[in-house]
Amino acid sequence: MTEKLTGYKGEAIVALKGSGVKIGDVIRITRDNDVFEGVLMPRYELADNKHIVIKLRNGYNIGVRVSPNIKIEKLGVGAKPTFSPPPPPKKKPGLPEVAIVGTGGTIASRVDYRTGAVHPAMSARDLYSVVPELSDIARVHAEILFSLFSENILTEHWTEMAESVAKYFSKGMNGVVICHGTDTMAYTAAALSFALQNLPGPVVLVGSQRSSDRPSSDASLNLVNAVKVASGAPFAEVVVCMHDSTSDRITSVHRGTKVRKCHTSRRDAFRSITITPIAKVKMNNIIMLTENFRKRDVRSELFLKPDFCDKVALVKFHPGLDPGVLEWYLSKGFKGIVLEGTGLGHIGKYMLPSIKNVIKNGLLVGMASQCIWGRINMNVYDIGRDLQNVGVVPLEDMFPETAFVKMSWVLGQTEDVEKAKKLLLTNIAGEISEKTRFEEW
């Protein structure tokens, strides 16, 4: 594989090298009685070695299988295929001001011909320029904060995002949109919900399940509606705005501490857990679904509390879990553990001695449930009461991801375990519901 013939190998690269062509050239391929003309396209590194890909005049790509009698001719010198966004539309005066902060993910990605995967490539400005509808909604200020797949985002990045949001609100923005990869977007939404208190306007996390160069992409609708929410929604909370269904009509707006990615690839992968979404956006209209929200108020003074402890673990109980896992976290200097227990908040009784030991040595240990819906109750069975007696904190209806993020934030605020327990059970951003609703799911 060479730079001039990206992705080609084996029989295909031998045939191409003999013709002196490179990516972007206009070529003619003759094979038996068939003739194909088009622009030579790159391939990804995991592709087979028997096909040459060209883009026809009608815009379609085809693969031509290499055969012993294949003939390749260069008809003209072309340019290597690249993405060039159109110039952004002019900003219109009098519209609300919204900041778009890019952090990476599929919504800010394009195809990587080297691997066949998507990679962060577009800047936040690119997103603005390729979605001109934004210019009718708000005056957009775009920034690329970093360009990471969401699985590479750490607690330090949560801090950077929180500080960036605070900066933009200090400049008078009506709202802030954060473009983020979907896989850990719910973690970041929870983190910002705790780090950004007394917000004057919405902070909207948005992503896409399918990159913007795919016909089925959800990027455009999600971004347009996220900016709509940031500029004009009546609430001032951290939320996630993503497709409500598989159709391109409606997006749901989920509270940042009550949202989870529930499907690997569907465009409506995100669901509110134990509560209804705060709102939906349909045909450019924001439809509120609840009166339980913090109201937008430009006079609000934002309280920035961006510190997180990265020595917190989320441990999922399963039959046969080695209790030595907890002792390992203790030996590595961890400060807290969220146990993802079964049902109402249970783990195997054989784990009790290790749990007692790590708590005795200063670790904060909380209990959430593996079940997504419902509420833990550690007073029903003996093991639940035993766990509470040794100091395990029941975490109400917080699901494990939110509980993990909150413990990380709590231990970033205080190292005093008793104060941390109290703060852990204080409802900061709607993460704890007063009562559990029964709903279909």
Image (spheres, grey):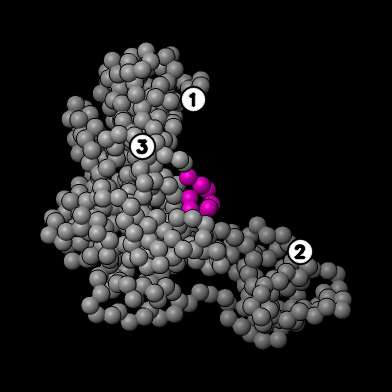
x, y (%) of residue 317? 45, 26
Q: Return the residue at label 2.
A: 50
Q: Return the residue at label 3.
A: 437
Q: Give yes or no for contact between labels 1 and 3 (Cβ–Cβ under 8 Å).
A: no
Instruction: Please tell me whether residue 173 belongs to the stretch shown in magenta.
Output: no
Q: Could you give the CA–CA distance between mark 1 and mark 2, rounded to whole angstroms?
A: 47 Å
Dot 2 or dot 3: first in sequence order is 2
Classify mark 1: residues with Cα within 10 Å, few (<14), some (14-19) or many (20+). few
Q: Nearer the viewer, mark 1 or mark 2?
A: 1
Q: Secondary structure at mark 2?
A: loop
Q: Could you give the CA–CA distance between mark 1 and mark 3, rounded to whole angstroms?
A: 27 Å
Residue plotted at (33% across, 14% down): 386
Residue plotted at (63% across, 75% down): 23
Q: Secondary structure at mark 3?
A: loop
* Amino acid marked by disc 3: Arg
Numbered label tally: 3
Which corner quadrant of the image does residue 430 belong to?
top left
* Amino acid marked by disc 2: Lys
Front position in the image: 365 or 399: 399
Q: Give yes or no for contact between labels 1 and 2 (Cβ–Cβ under 8 Å).
A: no
Q: Nearer the viewer, mark 1 or mark 3?
A: 3
- Which segment did they paint magenta? 262-269
Front position in the image: 159 or 5: 159
In this view of the protein, can residue 103 be seen by the observer? no
Q: Nearer the viewer, mark 2 or mark 3?
A: 3
Mark linked to residue 318: 1
- Prevailing secondary structure class for the magenta stretch in the rendered image: loop
* Amino acid marked by disc 1: His
Q: Secondary structure at mark 1?
A: loop
